[in-house]
Structure formats: C-alpha cells, structure tokens
Amino acid sequence: MLQKKDCNGDAGSSSDPRAQNSFWKKVWSQEIPQKLIFFNWRAIHNSRPCKANLLKRKIVSDDACPICIVNSENLIHVVWSCPGAQKVWKKVRFMEVFKGLQLSTYGDFFEAATNYLSTFEMRLFVYMLELMER
Ligand SMILES: [Zn+2]
C-alpha cells in the first residue's frame, strides 16, 4: 500500500482500511529502538523539522537543501531524492532495492523498505534515515 498523498505530498490515509492497518502494524512492529519507531511515526506524519516544514511555520526564510542547493529540503528529499542521499544509498548497496520505485513521501520509502529489506537491513535502514535527517 503506497499511501495517497494530500495536495502537499504528505502521507494521508488510504481508502482501504485493511491496507492502512497493515501499514501501521509494520510501522509499530519493527524490531528497532522505540525512539526510532517514534521517529518513523513522526516522519510518516510529516512532522519532522526539515526546512520545508520550518518554512511553512515561518521559522526559516527559505527551504533550500544545504547539500544540493537547488531543491526544497522536504523529508523525502533529505532521505531519498537529494544527490547526497543517493550517494549514501549507493555506498550501502540499498540503491538497487529502491531503484525504479515511485517514492514521493517518507511513508512510500518506509513501506518499500519493509517490503524488500530483511529485519537486519531494516534496522540499518532506519538508523541511516534518522542520521540523514539530522
Ligand atoms: Zn538536496
């Protein structure tokens, strides 16, 4: 279940309650420290302090990504579409897992990971996400 997005590209609710329930079970049942489960929950709800969110709250004056300069620093950009993030995923050999998938929200990215990565790889994936988002 890749989630529907609202007009801001944020994760929203699926029209299929069973798929939605299954998705949230995956989020809450990961064998990772609780702080990372909450990190995922907040990221899926687009409530992490990336510059695009800070700009919406008028905390910063621009949302340009400090790595590539040209794109808005929203969460999926930070952890996936930024050229800096792509280099990281290539180094750890996860790039092939996600190549060709339509990943427009953090929820899409997380769900793809739960579908294709082993339990061990999933732990590494979530730790890396948290580090990349800092
Ligand atoms: Zn960037």
Image (cartoon, rainbow, N blue to C red):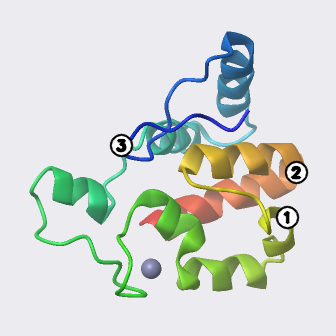
In the rendered image, residue 15, in percent from the top left (x then y), is placed at 62, 17
Ligand 1 placement by image quarter = bottom left
In the rendered image, residue 73, in percent from the top left (x then y), is placed at 37, 69
Q: Secondary structure at mark 3?
A: loop
User: Which sits earlier in the primary sequence, circle 2 or circle 1?
Assistant: 1
Q: Label 2 vs label 3: CA separation? A: 25 Å
On residue 22, the disc is none
Which residue appears farthest toward the front when viewing the image?
7
The local crowd at label 1, few if under 14, some if 14 to 19, many if 20 or more residues have their Cα within 10 Å, is some
Q: Which residue is mark 1?
A: 97
- The type of residue carrying mark 1 is Val
The local crowd at label 2, few if under 14, some if 14 to 19, many if 20 or more residues have their Cα within 10 Å, is few
Q: Residue at x 55, y 84 (%)?
A: 84
- Residue 88 placement, left or right of 60: right
Q: Which residue is mark 2?
A: 116
- The type of residue carrying mark 3 is Ser
Q: Are marks 2 and 1 in contact (CB under 8 Å)?
A: yes
Q: Are marks 2 and 3 in contact (CB under 8 Å)?
A: no
On residue 47, the disc is 3
- Residue 10 visible in the shown view: yes
Q: Residue at x 38, y 41 (%)?
A: 7
